[in-house]
Amino acid sequence: GSRKQLFVDDYLVAASQGIRFVMNPPQRDGRILVTNDQPWESHPRMYINAYCSVLKEKGEVRLWYDLWERDEQMNGKHGREGYAESTDGLNFTKPIQQQYEVNGSRENNIVIPGSIGGTAVWIDPHAPPEHRYKSQAKVYPSGEFHMHSSPDGVHWQPFVVLDKVPGDVDSQSIVFWDPHVQRYALYTRF
């Protein structure tokens, strides 16, 4: 067809001669795209965790990121989910949502509160519109596994709580609809 294709092997190539596949290595350019630069993120014990979710929809790049706060001993985990967006994937804004209080103010971009971590956001192609977006995260210190749903990726509600997951869920867990087996799949680390 006329769609752009990513050629990483010869799966889509009917014939070729004198062609070799070359993957260019990623390069760092020194730019930091998202940092804890807002008043609700600038507490000395706060930091943006490595776990983020990025979706490109209708020309907009949407980013959900874990914002963590260490406790007084600098080792606790108190995570929240922040939201940012961009038109070019390089310059992000953090729209004020006024949904949840952080340090006495609702002037922030927090879209999922609580002591969560490793959140992953995805679009569920089989869900009704009010549950189109899904997310899942580990809850600290209980170890529960919570899923949320949203119609727009900004206004979330609890969807499923798993308090009896086998083992200790760790890392960023990924859930998606697998069309090959016609059911949802979960990839995680225990």
Image (cartoon, helix red, strand yellow):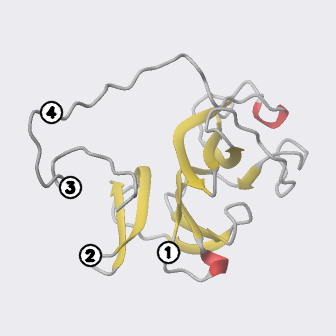
Please report whichever mark, 3 or 2, sits nearer to the chain's N-terminal start: 3
Inter-mark Cα distance, 4 to 1: 36 Å
Task: Kindly identify which residue carries mark 1.
Answer: 125
Label ID, residue 56: none
Q: Position of residue 133 (x, y in %)?
A: 59, 68
Q: Is 51 left or right of 12, judged from the image as shown?
A: right
Residue 7 occupies quadrant: top left
Q: What element carries label 4?
A: loop
Question: Which comes before the other along the chain, label 2 or label 1?
Answer: 1
Mark 4 or mark 3, earlier in chain: 3
Q: Is residue 47 visible?
A: yes
Marks 3,1: beta carbons within 8 A: no
Q: Is mark 1 on a helix, strand or loop?
A: loop
The residue that label 4 is drawn on is 20
Q: Is mark 3 on a helix, strand or loop?
A: loop
Q: Residue at x 54, y 72 (%)?
A: 161
**In the rendered view of the protein, which quadrant contains the C terminus?**
bottom left
Q: Which residue: 32% across, 25% down?
A: 25
Residue 145 vertical placement versus 183 (above, below)? above
Foreground tag (4 vs 2): 4
Which residue has dot 3 on it? Answer: 12
- The nearer-to-camera label among 4 and 1 is 4
In three-dimensional space, the C-alpha distance between marks 4 and 3, rounded to whole angstroms, equals 14 Å
- 100 lies left or right of 14: right
Is 88 in front, or is 182? Answer: 88
Front: mark 3 or 1: 3
The residue that disc 2 covers is 180
The span from disc 2 to disc 1 (Cα, nearest Å) is 14 Å
